[in-house]
Image (tube, grey):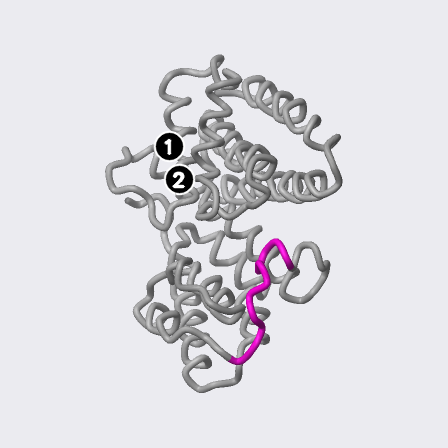
């Protein structure tokens, strides 16, 4: 895959999104939010692939996965008026279906197409499927990291009340009080992610976001999280309870231990 292949995909993406931006205000606002997110994920992906010094083919494959990973979000919101997969259907599967329907990747090799589809599918799962081949795992890890790096930004801005609309979309009117699910703290103490289905409050969402560090895969990702202060910003809005302070310390210690990890060794 080369720059011309990627430019064809980028051109299609711009044309595909354009009609959604002509629809009613509610749809336009949500679509624009996801378009902006997509472009930021592409930028995050650029940072990761530069740190890994990937060959040209892998660079453009990675950027294509980043550009296309959420393309199903637009049709999802038009059809269901929600971005919640549990209340609609998998946005990753919609993405794959749309790409197949529009024959977007027909100019690529069969291997490249399969890798892109597998990475898109894996990006929205709790964990990467165990049966993936080594190259598909690489691109799945890359998109999961790049996606998280921007979702942290979106979540924190919503939590800080930057925009009312963003706040409502991200938190879906979750109560903002002192309550939190003990299962979240247990998961963090075990170095595990918290199940999205267990979220009952904003504090649960904040703890969930903190636990995402356990799913990071590359040294550059750990450095970016630390440099941007994402965990500290999330922690600032949590209750000042001793068990929560221990959870924050666990997460920060994990980041510190893994920031200089050796990439692409497995």
Q: Which residue is mark 1?
A: 118
Q: Residue at x 37, y 17 (%)?
A: 110
44 or 164, which is in the foreground?
Answer: 164
The x and y percentages for residue 3 are 57, 22
Residues in magenta?
A: 168-178
Judge the density around disc 2: few (<14), some (14-19), many (≥20) Cα neighbours within 10 Å. Answer: many
Magenta span includes 174: yes
Q: Which residue is mark 2?
A: 140
Q: Residue at x 51, y 58 (%)?
A: 223
Majority secondary structure in the magenta region = loop
Q: Is residue 10 left or right of residue 219?
A: right
246 or 15, which is in the foreground?
Answer: 15
User: In whole angstroms, how far apart are the C-alphas of marks 2 and 1?
Assistant: 7 Å
Q: Residue at x 67, y 67 (%)?
A: 160
Work out which quarter of the rendered image holds the C terminus and state it. Answer: top left
251 or 91, which is in the foreground?
Answer: 91
Q: Residue at x 44, y 86 (%)?
A: 242
The x and y percentages for residue 7 are 61, 21
Q: Residue furthest top?
A: 107
Magenta span includes 50: no
């Amino acid at each position: 895959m080369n720059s011309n292949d990627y430019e064809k995909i980028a051109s299609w993406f711009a044309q595909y999104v354009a009609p959604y931006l002509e629809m009613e205000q509610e749809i336009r606002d949500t679509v624009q939010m996801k378009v902006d997110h997509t472009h930021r994920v592409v930028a995050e992906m650029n940072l990761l692939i530069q740190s890994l010094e990937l060959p040209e083919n892998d660079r453009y494959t990675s950027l294509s996965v980043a550009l296309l990973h959420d393309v199903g979000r637009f049709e999802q919101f038009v059809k269901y008026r929600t971005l919640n997969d549990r209340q609609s259907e998998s946005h990753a599967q919609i993405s794959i279906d749309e790409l197949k329907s529009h024959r977007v990747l027909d100019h690529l090799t069969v291997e490249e197409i399969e890798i892109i589809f597998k990475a898109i599918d894996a990006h929205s799962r709790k964990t990467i499927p165990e049966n993936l081949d080594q190259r598909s795992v690489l691109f799945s890890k890359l998109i999961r990291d790049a996606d998280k790096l921007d979702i942290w930004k979106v979540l924190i801005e919503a939590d800080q009340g930057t925009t009312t609309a963003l706040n409502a979309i991200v938190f879906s009117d979750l109560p903002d009080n002192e309550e939190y699910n003990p299962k979240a703290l247990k998961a963090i103490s075990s170095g595990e992610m918290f199940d999205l289905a267990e979220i009952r409050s904003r504090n649960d969402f904040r703890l969930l976001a903190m636990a995402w560090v356990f799913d990071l895969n590359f040294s550059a990702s750990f450095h970016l999280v630390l440099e941007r202060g994402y965990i500290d910003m999330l922690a600032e809005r949590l209750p000042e309870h001793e068990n929560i302070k221990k959870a924050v310390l666990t997460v920060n210690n994990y980041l510190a231990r893994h920031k200089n990890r050796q990439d692409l060794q497995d």
